[in-house]
Image (cartoon, grey):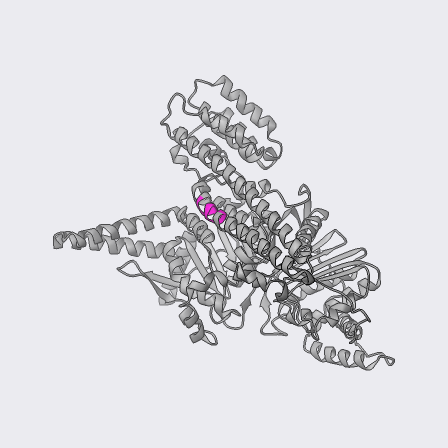
Amino acid sequence: MKKLLSMLLFSALLLLGGNGVSWADARSDYENYVAAYNAYRTAVNENKPASEIKTLSGAYLKAKATYEGSINRNSKPDETSEDSATTEVTSSEAATCVATGEGENSASIAQKQLPTGLQRILEQLWSEKGRKAPESAMKLLASFIESSAGSKYADVARYELAKAYELLKDDAVSASKILKQIGKNNPNSKIALLAKERINFLAAGQKHLQWKNALNSTYGVSQETYAKYRNTSWLAFPVKVTRWFGYAGKMADFNNTQSDFEKFQVWYEDMGAKFVPPVDVTFDKFKVANGTSNETSEVSLFYSNSKAWYSRWKLLEEARSSIDVQYFIMDEDIFGYSLLGMLLKKAQQGLKVRLLLDARGTKKFTRKLLGQDFLQELTEYPNVEVKVFNPVHTNLLSVVTDLRKLMASNHDKIIVIDKEYAIIGGRNVSMDYFLEPEDHPGAYRDCDVVVRSNEIAQQLDFAFDEEFAKLKTYSISKELWGNVDVMRDTLVAGYDAMYKHLLNERFSVPADANKKYTKAANSFLSELKGYSHLRDFTGFDPFATSIEAPCKIIDKHSLGGPRNDITDEMIKYIDGCKKEIMLQNPYVVLTERMFNALKRAGRRGVPIIMHTNSPASTDSLATQAMFYADWKRIFKEIPNIRIYVYKGSNKLHAKNWLFDRKIGVVGTYNLDYMSEQINSEVVAAVKSVEFAKQLRAEMISDINKSEQYQYSINEKGEVESVLGPDDLPGKKFWVLKLLSKFTIFKKLI
């Protein structure tokens, strides 16, 4: 009988869930709870009669229970339901003057139903097709305004026309002029007040542009002074020192400008959040750093570690003219050696090869003693360039101006082949990223996209070039008398052993092989022996399950550079979301800008689903310690957020975003200060309901293997753990808890 009742109750909950959870109601419950609590506390503080306090206490506890019930659910996100997040703007939205779906409160508009003719114009204007060629609909709007000058709907049309100039034509001046015409007959109307707010937002936008120009200017000056310092010989010691002080001063100017700009951005994003358009409009509006973004791309999503490696191997093996490779980590295992062996083979074939490795992430291959010999094998060929990003010796003096410069890394993971194919995602080069869990229990759960597109290849190559050409990279060059310790045989053996293994063919060491090749090959064969799930390469097609969709590369410089398009765009996506935000990230140390954006979304009633690591699954005690210190505050201040965490041997390394089931973002960007402020990062944004469906299904699959953090709120309004990180302790948990006390260092983690 109990089982039957449980099944009936579960079925009822499913039916309720099928009708959709009202997150607006959840927000209302939160407001009722806060109001009831404040009334109760006021009564206590003012020594009101006991009967009144008792009544208010009962109301408060009831409101508290209602709120907890609305936000602290055990259910997993629905994997298959399709809601209005995947649909275009409806006529009813247009009729309430929020045709673009932006954050303006439609209730503030007096007219709740527009004339049919105006509705149709707005539907045409804000449709996918209409946004690409808005001129016709904008002319119709102008005609409507002229013919209905005395109508109460004229201001509505003016407001929509102003938005079109701002969002679709990038003409803030014309938009402001039109907004100033609103409310002449009724200057205190709600739409007139909204127009005034938007005018202020557009003016702030001009200041935002001025800040960006100032940042670029101070950066350019600092680089000029650094070039003079670097190009001065130590033989001219007094001049060298003088020029270093000149550089330090200009770099301090850049740092101060960067810091002041960030403070402005916090204010600007908060005041303008209500005017951010929906996510698909934000995608369309973004201008890539270089090149064009007019064509659709062929995009494949890979969570499978082995298929991610097959994709790299196949595209590199078939490369015919050029290869650019950039990685944060390249380990000294069969994957690192075989990839370098592949690049060596392509160098011998005459392809243009460029390789950039990070000094901190790839210590062994980049160190000067007993490390660079392998990279120097590549530089024996004139068609090859190899560089190391930000080695310590180039930045020791910079520590005086900013300690973080010593930590700044190139965190990008980029492969561009033949100016047509590109791979971008969270994976480094190591067994941890390319072996299936069946072969390696410690393997990461990660994600890549493989893209066929000349435009995307061009955009990624520009991101590569900006870091490759920086003055604080160090070129690996061949030794004057040739490499003292020749490592070519090791790289060739790595390539040969890996290729045979992928093809599931038996590999035998050639009879005429020298001792170095034989020793390396035997070592690699021993390593590969246990990798039985890495033998299905034959016939593999990286685009077998691809989709055609618009795609854009969004880039961010390391600390020493001015570009931070990723943070800017992710916050716009968050502010423009209406239906759902999904975040999958291994390292969560929320910055002020990101925390505020998620808080705004939660307060709008947007459900936020976060998937990350627990203390039991993390590979970074420091970042998990900061999350441990923050997780209760996140629940307290960000409504409508649910947090799911991996446990046990599962280790998350994917860095993905999903906005309104329309825009999927895959890349290297972590939810921490290191990614937002210190390291270089790069992501790919894809506008496609089908791609979003694939990405969401993988995220849901991971969530189904995870635990959900749960909490309650006590009578003091404090968050108490029901199931949290203390229930999923990992190794050295005591160290993690100790580190969590030192939040003063969170900006360095």
Horizontal arrangement in the rendering, residue 239 relative to residue 745 (left or right): right
Q: Is residue 262 magenta?
A: yes
Q: Is residue 333 above or below residue 427?
A: below
Vertical position of residue 450 compared to residue 617: above or below:
above
Look at the image and tell me in which quarter the N terminus lies: bottom left
Q: Residue 519 versus residue 541: which sits nearer the camera?
A: 519
Relative height, residue 571 to residue 374 (above, below): above
- Residue 201, how many percent across, how many down? 46, 37
45 vs 282, left or right, is left
In the figure, is residue 2 to the left or right of 281? Answer: left
Residue 389 spot, x, y in % from top left? 65, 61
- Helix, strand or loop for the magenta stretch, by majority: helix
Is residue 235 found inside the magenta-colored segment of the image? Answer: no
Residue sitting at x 55%, y 43%? 214
User: Residue drawn 50% across and 58% down?
Assistant: 673
Q: Is residue 19 visible?
A: no
Q: Which residues are magenta?
A: 261-267
Residue 401 in percent (x, y) is at 53, 58
Of residues 497 and 90, the one drawn nearer to the viewer in this rendering: 497
